[in-house]
Amino acid sequence: MTTILHATLVMERRYNASPKRVFDAWENVEARKRWSAPAPDIAIEYERSEFREGGRDISHCVENGKRAHVAEVTYLDIRQDQSIVVAEAVSLHGKKLSTALISVELMPHGAGTELLLTMQIAAFDAEMENGYQFGWSAALDNLAKEFA
């Protein structure tokens, strides 16, 4: 019997860029490749990228030149310059590790943007909550570099 571990993670960031610019950094796959890699020795490669409602992304986490985790994302709701909601399934070598509902909200904050990221995770592997925490925290920190 598989145990499902549940977690909700909430992360907030403020960026010195308008909601439009922050949204554009999510929409543009080349920008996403830059900021979403959580560490210098990790790259994100997209096999497929369809940023639109109903669209799908398939990306691979590449560590030391080898493909590892696969993330399959379905875009459930996109509101231009305001929010993005996706369903994500993560696997490793064909074994499902987790599924998650992820929402990104972009709110004007002065001349910049306040970002609120909420993840509701169902994990089939005990390490996935830590993986989401590490990966998304680093990615959101990297996103700030897009506006420097």
Image (cartoon, rainbow, N blue to C red):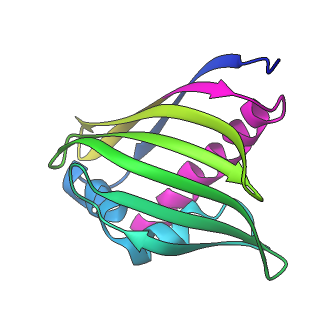
Give the magenta part as a residue range.
Answer: 119-148
> Count the marks: how many?
0
Q: Is residue 131 magenta?
A: yes
Residue 98, image quadrant: top right
Query: Whole-percent x and y of residue 109?
Result: 27, 36
Outermost bottom residue: 65
Residue 41 vertical placement versus 86 (above, below): below
Q: Nearer the viewer, residue 82 or 107?
A: 82
Question: Which residue is painted at 50% across and 75% down in the image?
Answer: 47
Task: Indicate left or right for 14 with 130 as reference.
Answer: left
Residue in view at x 70 percent, y 28 percent: 123
Q: Is residue 144 visible?
A: yes
Query: Observer-nearest residue: 28 or 107?
Result: 28
**Residue at 37 percent of width and 48 percent of height:** 74
Position in image of residue 115 (x %, y %): 38, 38
Q: Is residue 145 magenta?
A: yes
**Helix, strand or loop for the magenta stretch, by majority:** helix
